[in-house]
Image (spheres, rainbow, N blue to C red):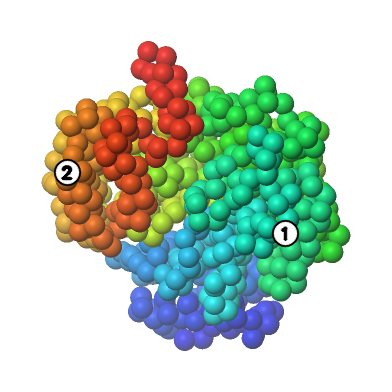
Amino acid sequence: MNIIINSFEPADATIRLAQSELEKLLSSAGMADLKAEFYLSETEGYSLCNEDGILKFSAPSAVEILYAVYDFAEIFMGYCFFEPGVDLRADVNDEIPTGLLFDKKCPKLKRRGFIQEFPFSEDSFLLADWMVKNRLNYVMTWMKYYDLISDELKEYFAVRGIEIESGHHNFSYWIPTSEYGEKHPEFFAMKDGVRIKPSEDKNALLLSEQLCTTNPELRTEMAEKMIAYSKCHPEIKTLSIAPNDGFGWCECPECSKFYDTNDMGEFYCVSEHTYRAGRIYHDMFDDVARQFHTVCPDVDVTFMAYVNYSRPSPGFKLKPGEIVYFAPYWRCINHSIADEKCPVNKDYKRDILEWCACRDGGEINIYEYFMGVNFYLSLPMIHHELMFDEVDFYHQNKVEGLLTQFHFSHWGVYGINYYAMAQAGYGADKQQFLTKIFSALFGKHAAQYQEFYKASRVLQESAGECLLPYQRHLFRRTDTVQFENLSELAAALPQDIPYPAMCERLKIWSQYLLKFKKLSDSAHAKTLTIEELELFLKWCHSQKDKGVIVLDRLDMYFTALADCLKNGKEWIHFNIDWEDDHIKQVDKYLSAESV
């Protein structure tokens, strides 16, 4: 096999990876006699032509040559890179057409990838491999997880052109209680005239513990910590200044100047119970980012737009080196994010366009939940077709990035969403994508499996014109017979398909949905017992490693239900008062009569 590298530095690890991957792919397909050449081009996008039996790849960067290799494998060699560690290949005509095969292919979005809310592991090597095969290039993770990554894994991601951002909710990382709680109590928020004493062990969500963001010494300390961290990790290109998850902003006299306790947050972004915090957060961010960029001008700084700081504050400008993560938390999953007819998503669309309007050299990433949210727990979100509409909306408005939360262990439920996001992000055609994915996974039975997914989407839509991603909103608006019917459809799915694991997963998934529905109904009827809950959890754990359920999230979630069963409290969601109150309001606002 002869693969010639032109113009690129021969020692470049990424171009060498492209060379070895092409050799492996051609050899596995019985095409080892094909010749190929890699060319560095000055034009945008990657291209491929077959000229006199020589495959000529050209791109302006080594990683785009690698993208072109994998794109060639999918288009002309029958590969489908659906899941980490799984490369499917259909029987295809092994004759490669002559002439131009594809030309100047460019992404629709600059950043495309994942938000990782769990530690890195050996599976992370599979993830990086899958990401580059699908032309994804970004992972945002918690700083506590980045600190544990091995140098080998960092290099593995870097060679594949994948940036890892060390960030997420991190006030408690920059200013930890263990370091500052006693010597600088003034750094922490004041509530009811008293400085809080935050406990890092009390609540993983830190729902009421922020900082005294107007304190100038605190701001300087945070900037200096960021500078030191950046110098210690020169590979880092992006850091965060992001509040602890939730609310709990400081109410000291100085901080109180930045908000009005009568100017409450809005219903759609789950914050009508508290005041807007945009001004207090953005003023701090501006100052800390400025101090940091004075020393580290080449490192981008990200921040969050979420709940009661979802919108730009008056006069705020998104400046160069600044990136906002906009998170449409508890968005409607039955509509596109840009659907003006949706009473929930229309407000998120407005917010996104407001961030676009305040852009002054800075950039926008969308922080998504294409698995519902963490506590949606493998319930239906059939979203792969809408994905293409949403990417088009972001592309039209020059949004730079789209990332989603994910888990390995529910790939059988949401994997098509992740694959669709990757394909849409690089301009794939929706109909061609649907034909490819169903053919690759289900072969001659593609039509029958498509009917199953359509039925799943119908069940999802039957919960109301709008559906928010938590169990109550789905189960309180649907009938058990619908889940029984879906389970019957799953039971009839044939197993002689290219990827039999998906057949097993869909059968397990439909059983899980039916069991979860019955459990939910019993809980709301106040007839559920602890023993019945334990039996459900035991069954769920018997499905470990099947690609359907994220068991640690399930166990965490059902502690709330167990507590309700023990104390006789009504089970709403996760026993957080403001959250439960919001869900009750949603029940009224999105009732069948009002939609």
Secondary structure of the residue carrying numbered label 2: helix
Q: Nearer the viewer, residue 77 or 378?
A: 378
Residue 427 at least partly seen: no
Q: Position of residue 555 (x, y in %)?
A: 32, 52
Secondary structure of the residue carrying numbered label 1: loop
Q: Position of residue 500 (x, y in %)?
A: 22, 60
Using the image, determine if residue 241 lies above or below residue 352.
Answer: below
Using the image, determine if residue 176 lies above or below residue 54.
Answer: above
Residue placed at 20% from the left, 58% from the top?
542
Residue 10 at least partly seen: yes
Which residue carries the number 1 mark? Answer: 183
Farthest top residue?
593
- Residue 343 is marked as none
Which residue carries the number 2 mark? Answer: 532
Density class for disc 1 (Cα within 10 Å; few <14, some 14-19, many ≥20) is: few
Density class for disc 2 (Cα within 10 Å; few <14, some 14-19, many ≥20) is: few
Gap in Å between the C-alphas at discs 1 and 2?
49 Å
Left or right of residue 230: residue 496:
left
Q: Amino acid at mark 1?
A: Lys
Residue placed at 73% from the left, 30% from the top?
259
